[in-house]
Image (cartoon, rainbow, N blue to C red):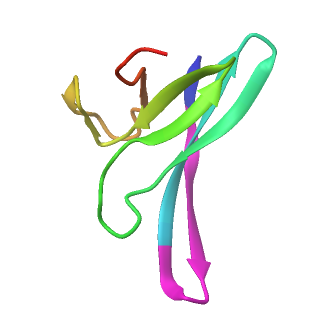
Amino acid sequence: MLTFVGERHVTFPEYPCGFDYHDSHVTSGSETLTGSWSAGTGEIGPASFTVAGRRFLLELVHSERRGRLEANEPVATRPWPWQ
């Protein structure tokens, strides 16, 4: 299960403007982890994560398969080749 849980802003000494992170909880059976997505310095690409031994890509804003996404609509997809 993939659930959007919120946004947070983090600053760094090297980049005081900081970055906005969009966090989602990913749950599979008894395993839960937090996946974070950020446009960072401008590249809007998926964030990779592994849950229950399977690799997924977390997409937000735009999905390779679904196009433009609604605000705060996270999508988890399996990368090719399927693992």
Residue at 58 percent across and 78 percent down: it is 11
Residue at 36 percent across and 70 percent down: it is 41
**Seen in the image, is 16 located left or right of residue 78?**
right
Q: Position of residue 34 (x, y in %)?
A: 66, 39
Q: Nearer the viewer, residue 9 or 83?
A: 83
Q: Quadrant of residue 75?
A: top left
Q: Residue at the top extreme?
A: 29
Q: Quadrant of residue 42?
A: bottom left
Q: Quadrant of residue 23?
A: top right
Q: Position of residue 31 (x, y in %)?
A: 78, 21
Residue at 50 percent across and 85 percent down: it is 15
**Quarter of the figure that contains the N terminus:** top right
**Seen in the image, is 1 located left or right of residue 76?**
right
Q: Is residue 69 above or below residue 7?
A: above
What's drawn in magenta, residue-wise?
4-18
Indicate yes or no whether the magenta region holds residue 19.
no
Q: Position of residue 51 (x, y in %)?
A: 65, 24
Q: Is residue 28 above or below residue 35?
A: above
Q: Position of residue 10 (x, y in %)?
A: 59, 71
**Seen in the image, is 65 located left or right of residue 14?**
left
Q: Residue at the left extreme?
A: 67
Q: Is residue 49 above or below residue 42?
A: above
Residue at 30 percent across and 43 percent down: it is 61
